């Protein structure tokens, strides 16, 4: 446990997030320690653990410190674990949670599952060793192997070293194979940079692009990639991130919401936003983030609102699109047509069927409608039982 | 003397044949069903019925509208009537029932009123006389005619 280093949790330039998992507990060797509930993040350079309750408590181990990893299957009452065997801490290591430890391995317990995928990704990173190709600030660089002049030891250390050398060899072969792919990734990055700069130019109205083209280009950008994606990297984790995300969401969702009659389910929002943000940051918009950001929408006085129906379905609605308006719309349509199924209503209003159904059921609950359930289908009528004698 | 039966507006309203989930709406619906059953049975002088008959009877089965009240919902209506005192089950398996479009207490009251008015208190009076006697020819008394 003395290999961990305190960190802010912010990723460095050239460091990318690979996978993260909530509900992870850290063991010092076999011993339970106070770090019992956190989010484990794997980046190209480090393994980061952040306390779920106190986001300030965040520590990391460079991947280069890892000798090898093992899986430990789940048992009765025990979660699946990954055992991480580590090199001894370097002498110039930055301060961390433990000054010294008798163990040279730690265990990561996945109380909320996710161990299999995490292990796979971690193994991949260990094989690819991307941190060697993309150096970051000095503090992260630690001993990759035996220091020159060190006595060739036998025993565990010797085994560890041998394994590492083997891994290096394998890695070299694989990275040669992946060379093309990384070149592609570089190009993709360039494309994103390019679109960013064009978008900025548009913002400042520099260059000779006409008003019309500006608008068109903006809409392309929106459906393809946003100019300034809000990422964890720029804003770190926590509420700041969610606030910014919420602002960005409000922007993205304006047009689609209007198209869909002022209301969208949360899954629709998630898909739309991820598409818009592009592959570069796709990994980052996980559903808890989205929900948090949406919860903040109303607080930030953005004209959007997150509502939950009885069935648990969550939607984003334009703030002025209150329940009364939905109900009014339902009643208006039904009075016009005499009776409606939820599918017919959805079509008339331009809403998704799922949401139309919710609206209709709500109207029934409030006593405005009654139902006719027959082989012909489920149809709704004005509630004449109440309005007529 | 059978009047032509006039169906209430609900009978032509499709939702009438679906048991409503909204509690307030259901209350109104059941009340309408109860009064329909009673007036139907009264007109057709039907005092008992089986559940099977009920299902196919035009009472619960509006052929023109292509709607029928499902048997579970019929049971709910019958239970309402029983609670109000207008229905009695004739067997344990609840397959046939007695319909009393006037509850026994109501009959008692009416009979008493009629008897007092015609000055026949304190004399013994058979049911036969009551239901078919000449004295019962007036408007009020005719209510008793044909009652089983």
Image (cartoon, rainbow, N blue to C red):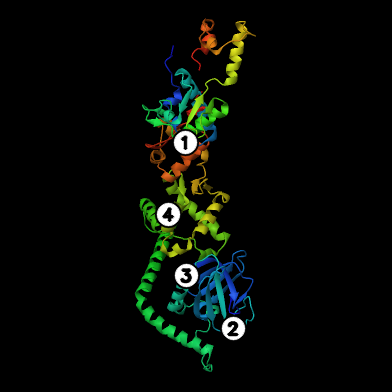
Q: Which of marks 3 and 4 is nearer the N terminus?
A: 3
Residue B129 in view (yes/no): yes
Residues tagged by mark 3 and mark 4 found on one chain of the structure: yes
Q: Which one is in front in this view, the residue at disc 1 or the one at disc 4?
A: 1
Q: Where is residue A96 in the image (x, y as percent from the top left)?
A: 62, 76
State the SS at label 4: helix
Q: Earlier in the sequence, mark 2 or mark 4?
A: 2
**Alpha carbon of mark 2 to alpha carbon of mark 4: how far?**
47 Å
**Badge 2 density bin: few <14, some 14–19, many ≥20, Cα 10 Å:** few
Disc 2 marks which residue?
Answer: A92
**Alpha carbon of mark 1 to alpha carbon of mark 4: how far?**
46 Å
**Alpha carbon of mark 3 to alpha carbon of mark 1: how far?**
51 Å
Disc 3 marks which residue?
Answer: A116
**Alpha carbon of mark 3 to alpha carbon of mark 4: how far?**
29 Å
Q: Nearer the viewer, residue A167 or A223?
A: A167
Disc 4 marks which residue?
Answer: A272
Q: Tell me whether the residue at label 1 lies in contact with that at label 4, contact meaning CB atoms closer than 8 angstroms.
A: no
In the picture shown, does residue A246 fall above or below B72? below
Q: Which one is in front in this view, the residue at disc 3 or the one at disc 2?
A: 3
Q: Which one is in front in this view, the residue at disc 2 or the one at disc 4?
A: 4
State the SS at label 2: loop
Q: Tell me whether the residue at label 3 lies in contact with that at label 4, contact meaning CB atoms closer than 8 angstroms.
A: no
* Residue at image point 62% right, 83% down: A102
* Residue at image point 52% right, 55% down: A291
Disc 1 marks which residue?
Answer: B72
């Amino acid at each position: 446990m003395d290999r961990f280093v305190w960190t802010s949790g912010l990723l460095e330039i050239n460091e990318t997030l690979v996978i993260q998992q909530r509900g992870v507990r850290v063991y010092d060797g076999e011993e339970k320690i106070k770090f019992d509930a956190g989010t484990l993040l794997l980046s190209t350079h480090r393994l980061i653990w952040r306390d779920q309750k106190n986001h300030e408590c965040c520590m990391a181990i460079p991947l280069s410190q890892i000798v090898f990893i093992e899986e430990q299957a789940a048992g009765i009452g025990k979660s699946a674990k990954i055992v991480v065997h580590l090199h001894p801490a370097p002498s110039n290591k930055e301060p961390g949670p433990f000054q010294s430890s008798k163990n040279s391995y730690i265990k990561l317990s996945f109380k909320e599952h996710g161990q299999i995928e995490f292990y796979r990704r971690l193994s991949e990173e260990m094989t690819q060793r991307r941190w060697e190709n993309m150096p970051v600030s000095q503090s992260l660089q630690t001993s990759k192997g035996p220091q020159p002049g060190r006595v060739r030891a036998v025993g565990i250390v010797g085994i560890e070293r041998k394994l590492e050398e083997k891994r290096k060899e394998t890695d070299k072969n694989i990275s040669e194979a992946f060379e093309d792919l990384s070149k592609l990734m570089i190009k993709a990055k360039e494309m994103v940079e390019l679109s960013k700069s064009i978008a900025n130019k548009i913002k400042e109205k520099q260059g000779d692009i006409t008003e019309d083209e500006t608008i068109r280009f903006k809409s392309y950008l929106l459906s393809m990639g946003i100019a300034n994606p809000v990422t964890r990297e720029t804003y770190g984790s926590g509420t700041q991130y969610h606030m910014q995300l919420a602002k960005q969401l409000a922007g993205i969702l304006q047009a689609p919401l209007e198209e869909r009659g002022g209301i969208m389910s949360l899954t629709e929002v998630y898909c739309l936003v991820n598409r818009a943000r592009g592959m570069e940051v796709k990994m980052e918009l996980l559903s808890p983030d989205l929900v948090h950001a949406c919860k903040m929408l109303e607080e930030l006085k953005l004209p959007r609102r997150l509502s939950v129906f009885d069935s648990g379905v969550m939607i984003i609605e334009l703030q002025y699109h209150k329940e009364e308006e939905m109900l009014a719309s339902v009643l208006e349509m039904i009075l016009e047509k005499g009776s409606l199924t939820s599918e017919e209503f959805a079509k008339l209003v331009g809403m998704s069927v799922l949401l139309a159904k919710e609206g209709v059921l709500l109207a029934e609950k409030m006593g405005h409608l009654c139902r006719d359930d027959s082989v012909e289908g489920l149809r709704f009528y004005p509630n004449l039982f109440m309005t007529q004698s | 003397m059978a009047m032509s039966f006039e169906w209430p507006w609900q009978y032509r309203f499709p939702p009438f044949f679906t048991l409503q989930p909204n509690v307030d709406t259901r209350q109104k619906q059941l009340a309408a069903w109860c009064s329909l059953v009673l007036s139907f049975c009264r007109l057709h002088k039907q005092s008992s019925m089986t559940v099977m008959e009920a299902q196919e009877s035009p009472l619960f089965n509006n052929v023109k509208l292509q709607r029928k009240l499902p048997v579970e919902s019929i049971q709910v209506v019958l239970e309402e009537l029983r609670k109000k005192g207008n229905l009695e089950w004739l067997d344990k398996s609840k397959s046939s029932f007695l319909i009393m479009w006037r509850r026994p207490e109501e009959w008692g009251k009416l009979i008493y009123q009629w008897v007092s008015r015609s000055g026949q208190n304190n004399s013994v009076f058979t049911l036969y006389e009551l239901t078919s006697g000449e004295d019962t020819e007036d408007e009020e008394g005719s209510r008793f005619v044909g009652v089983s």
